[in-house]
Structures are given as structure tokens and as C-alpha cells.
Image (cartoon, rainbow, N blue to C red):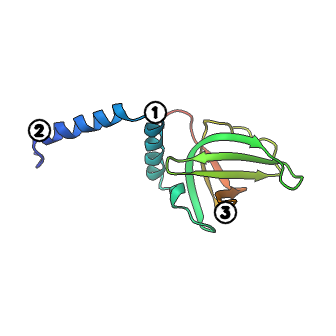
């Protein structure tokens, strides 16, 4: 049997239900992304430091084509619930599967550019669209 009294278990469940109902959709999605990152054994983007080699996972929020020094560059914003990270593929105009809303796991060395975390030409893995 459990050492926690039944009334405390019910209060805990009730508190979690109230918290979920009173949280915004964005807060709930952020919490889910943080849990996914932890489950996958990845570094939280918010914990990444300059020049650190990391593996991160999250959802692509935006994908844009933005030339850098006259060379095409595909840029995507990866969000894991703790912070955002720019993922940049130099010399690419598009990559099949890289689109907003897609889950991605990326590995590489973090750099800082204009106060934002950036991963250039990372190793990446597209995650399934539905629940695993």
C-alpha cells in the first residue's frame, strides 16, 4: 500500500487538473516540449552555453530562406519549451521535411550570434509527427 493518504492523492490530482485548466495552451505545449526533451535525454536549449556541443530537440516554429554573405541559408527556429534556438543550414534553399510544426532532434556546437543561440549545419533527425 502507498504511504500517502488517499485524501492527499486526490488533492494532488485535483490541483494538477486545476493547474492544467487554468494554464494557457502555450504553457501546456511548452511543458510538453520540456518533458519530451528530458525524456529523449537532450540538453534543454535554455541551459546551452556558447561553444558547447549539444543534442537538442523541439518543434520548428518558423522556417525562412535568408541569404548570408550572398550564399543561400535555410534558417529555422527550434523551440523546446525552455528557450529558442536558430538552426541554420548554409548553402541550402530547402530541405524536405523541414517545415513549421515539425519535431526535430539536432546535434552540433552552439554559437552565439546577436545574442541568440545558433547551430550551424547540425546533424539532425526528423521526429515522427504523431505521438511515439
Which residue lies under the disc numbered 1?
25
Q: CA distance from mark 1 to mark 2?
A: 29 Å
In the structure shown, which secondary structural element does the residue marked by tag 2 occupy?
A: helix
Residue 94 in view in this figure = yes
Note whether 73 is above or below 16 in the view shown. Answer: below
How far across and how far down the image is residue 115, in percent?
65, 60
Residue 43 in view in this figure = no
Q: Residue 7 shows which numbered tag? A: 2
Note whether 19 is above or below 40 in the view shown. Answer: above
The residue drawn where x is 57% and y is 57% is 55
Crowding at dot 3, Cα within 10 Å, few <14 / some 14-19 / many 20+, comes out as some
Which residue lies under the disc numbered 3?
112
In the displayed orientation, state which residue is furthest to the bottom.
51
In the structure shown, which secondary structural element does the residue marked by tag 3 occupy?
A: strand
Mark 2 vs mark 3: give the one in front: 3
Residues at marks 2 and 3 touching, judged by CB atoms closer than 8 Å: no
Q: Residue 71 shows which numbered tag? A: none
Note whether 79 is above or below 47 in the view shown. Answer: above
Amino acid at each position: 500500500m502507498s504511504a500517502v493518504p488517499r485524501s492527499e492523492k486526490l488533492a494532488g490530482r485535483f490541483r494538477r487538473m486545476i493547474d492544467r485548466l487554468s494554464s494557457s495552451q502555450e504553457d501546456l505545449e511548452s511543458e510538453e516540449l520540456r518533458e519530451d526533451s528530458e525524456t529523449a535525454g537532450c540538453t534543454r536549449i535554455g541551459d546551452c552555453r556558447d561553444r558547447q556541443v549539444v543534442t537538442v530537440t523541439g518543434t520548428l516554429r518558423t522556417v525562412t530562406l535568408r541569404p548570408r554573405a550572398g550564399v543561400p541559408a535555410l534558417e529555422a527556429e527550434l523551440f523546446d519549451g525552455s528557450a529558442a534556438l536558430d538552426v541554420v543550414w548554409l548553402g541550402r534553399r530547402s530541405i524536405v521535411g523541414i517545415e513549421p510544426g515539425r519535431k526535430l532532434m539536432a546535434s552540433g556546437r552552439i554559437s552565439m550570434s546577436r545574442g541568440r543561440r545558433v547551430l550551424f549545419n547540425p546533424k539532425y533527425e526528423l521526429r515522427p509527427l504523431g505521438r511515439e
